[in-house]
Amino acid sequence: MTCAHRVPPTPSLQIGGRDETKPAASAAAPARDRLRAFYLHMTLWTVQAWLAMFFAGAAYAKLTQSQEILGQLLGWTEDVDLMVVRALGMIELALAFGVLAPLVAWRGGGQVMALSVIGMIGLTAFAMALHLSRLEPGFAALNLCLSSLALAVLIGRLRENRATL
């Protein structure tokens, strides 16, 4: 005796008043898209946290260390007033907090984060030019990497927001 096994029909979808069957392969596409969006979202948060930690660490050094130690660490601080270095540290600290603003403020945090990321890009571009003029390619490359990461966050968040509109 043979038992005929019947495959259940695919779920139907109402389109314009009539039933349309949806192929099983495309039924997994929305789930795959949601998973891809989730991974992108988590990657962007990871990069944002890394940028915040880097900028907070740089700000801490600029705000707490003496001019002599800063001169040994950074070099360029020997040529400027200590108050300029401290002000730059405050700006870096504000940018570090701003890039994490959506964690604290559910509404409006996105605009603060975007402005902070734009500030990071501008600050690292300025720092890269400074280090290139001082013939410090290592520091210039570091600032290029930071600027690239900040730009990736900005583009990723803009695409993410456009997709949800």
Image (cartoon, rainbow, N blue to C red):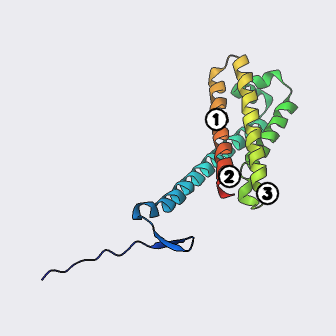
Amino acid found under the numbered disc labelled 3: Gly
Q: Residues within 10 Å of mark 2 (few under 14, many from 20)?
A: few
Distance Cα–Cα, label 3 vs label 2: 16 Å
Q: Which one is closest to the eye, mark 3 or mark 2?
A: 2
Residue at 24 percent across and 77 percent down: it is 5
Residue 56 position (above or below residue 11): above
Residue 138: tell me if it is visible. Answer: yes
What residue would you read off at disc 2? 162
What residue would you read off at disc 3? 108
Amino acid found under the numbered disc labelled 1: Ser
The mark that comes first in sequence, 3 or 2, is 3
**Residue 148, label in figure:** 1
Residue 51: tell me if it is visible. Answer: no
Amino acid found under the numbered disc labelled 2: Arg
Q: Quadrant of residue 90?
A: top right
Residue 54 x/y as whole percent: 67, 41
Tag 1 secondary structure: helix
Of the 4 image quadrants, the one containing the N terminus is: bottom left
Q: Between residue 131 and residue 7, name the one nearer to us.
A: 7
Q: Between residue 146 and residue 22, name the one nearer to us.
A: 22
The mark that comes first in sequence, 3 or 1, is 3
Q: Are marks 3 and 1 in contact (CB under 8 Å)?
A: no
Please give left or right for residue 40 compared with residue 112 in the image.
left
Please give left or right for residue 163 compared with residue 3 in the image.
right
Distance Cα–Cα, label 3 vs label 1: 24 Å
Residue 125 x/y as whole percent: 73, 29
Of the 4 image quadrants, the one containing the C terminus is: bottom right
